[in-house]
Image (spheres, coloured by chain):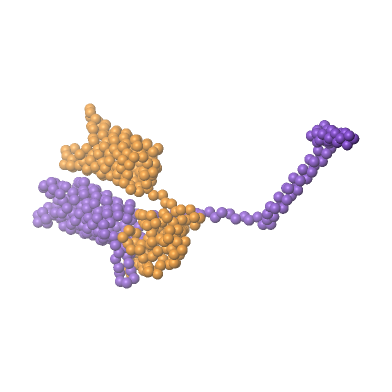
Chain colours: A purple, B orange
Amino acid sequence: MENRIRILLLTLALTATSGCASLHRLWPWHRHADAEVAAQKADAAADAAAAAAEAAPPPTVIEPQVERRKIKVPKIAARNFEIGAKYGEISIESYTAAPVAAVMLDYHITEDFFFEASAGQADAGQTSFETLGGNIQLLTSEERKFRYYNLSLGYNFLPGEVFLGRNHAMTSAFYMLGGMGAVKFEGDQKFAVNFGAGFRVLPTDWLAVRIEAQDIVFKSDFLGTNRLRNNLAAYLGATVYF
Amino acid sequence: MLAPSTTTTRLPRRSISPLCRPLALLLLALPMVAQSAQRELLQLFVVEPYLELHTGPGRGYPVTQVVARGDSVDVLFRRTEWYKVRTERGIEGWAAEEALLKTTLADGTPFHIERGNRDGFRSHSWEFGILAGDYGGASMIGGLVARSLTDNLNIELYGAQFLGDTYNGYIADLGLSHVFKPEWRCSPFVTLGTGVERVEPKTTLVAPTHQNFQTAYVGFGARYYLARRTFLRAEYRSHTVFTNGNTNEVETEWKIGFAFFY
């Protein structure tokens, strides 16, 4: 019987005290214990931070100051323009043949096509009528100057290479030119059409030598009837690429 | 990396023939040539298996040299869509633009070059053109400069010479043009402006005097993109010539030509 009473009392006592853990904040002596726990937690956090600091790589002695290399992109020189002069002989229809000089400026659009602006001058001789007629002069010396300009489209239709002996190779091209312009002659300026063909050789990358044949056609009634007049010319020229 | 090719031969060194030397020396004195020799060169690295070098600036010229992947070339200059390059071993040759666009700069970024395309056709700053046609029955040859204010609006300056049976002369026009659909390959436009006309009657007429007139014009036309920076331009204009007489004269003009944009 006594044993049973002891067990019952002990059970009651255990039941009563087991809830004290959850009620500890009610008691002033437990508040001190809370502060201790907080201090322990702070210590633990500090330890963790120290451990993390130890795990991190050590501070470097020399700071690497490598600047990223900046690539400057130089501009590529474009050499699509060609400027030069040519000299030759022009057979002015109804007049004698005469030396002719011209200047030209070319712009290469693609490897096949180019534009050319050209201007030239020749001093025409006498017509057959003047030669046979003795003292008759149809034109003044200023009117006898054959001046022309034209704008043409060119086509390199046979590009290739020419060889000088064993060691020299030069790029070359046959080309065709056609365009329009004006001719100032016999005291008048006429619309003119020009077409021709030539052969261009480049001894160096920037120098070209050309042989060219060209016909300049215009319509005139100066010598009696209104008809087309062909003026064939052959030239030797040199140009510089830039 | 590919081993250097054993089947290709070294390019023959091209030198100036003795006949050309005096002329070459004379032309070497030109400052532009001397200046271009001192330029800093662009270095490009081959990232494709190899880069082909041709003997000349054209598709038909034979390939006599290749540059292996990883090697570099210095770009000396370009002519149309061909680039004269020098390899690390000092060999020179011509590379196609299409092939060079597959190379990289020293920092690994792809090589890029501004070349004309449809985007440039739609939006650009300047236009230059050469046109020919008819002005009041006379043949006409002229040049055009245009500045783009927007993709649609341009300010245009046009100068031309006209050559007729009874009179010659010049015109100079300044005006605005409005392009309706600049993104279209064939884009229509309208134009409006003012100008001057100088008429030089032929000496066979009774009163051969030069006369200057002020003009105003309206017109329309179309631009058609061809390739790279080139396009076709065709246009019709109606000019009202303000004469000293009781009535003004009307001159019609049409022209067609090539133009370039930059």
Q: Position of residue A13 (x, y in %)?
A: 85, 34
| Residue at 22% from the left image edge and 51% from the top image edge | A194
What number of labels is visible? Answer: 0
For residue B34, say whether it is visible: no
For residue A168, say whether it is visible: yes
| Residue at 37% from the left image edge and 69% from the top image edge | B7
Query: Is A158 located above or below residue B249 in the figure?
Result: below
> Which quarter of the picture shows residue B261?
top left
Q: Nearer the viewer, residue A23 or B10?
A: A23
Q: Nearer the viewer, residue B214 or B251?
A: B251
Q: Nearer the viewer, residue A2 or B247?
A: A2
Q: Position of residue B38 (x, y in %)?
A: 45, 60
Residue found at the far bottom of this picture? A166
| Residue at 36% from the left image edge and 40% from the top image edge | B183
Query: Is B222 located above or below residue B6 in the figure?
Result: above
In the image, A51: left or right of B83? right
Query: Is B34 located above or below residue A184 in the figure?
Result: below
> Which quarter of the picture shows residue A9?
top right
Q: Position of residue A71 (x, y in %)?
A: 51, 54
In the image, A42: left or right of A63? right
Q: Position of residue B89 (x, y in %)?
A: 44, 67
Residue found at the far left of this picture? A133
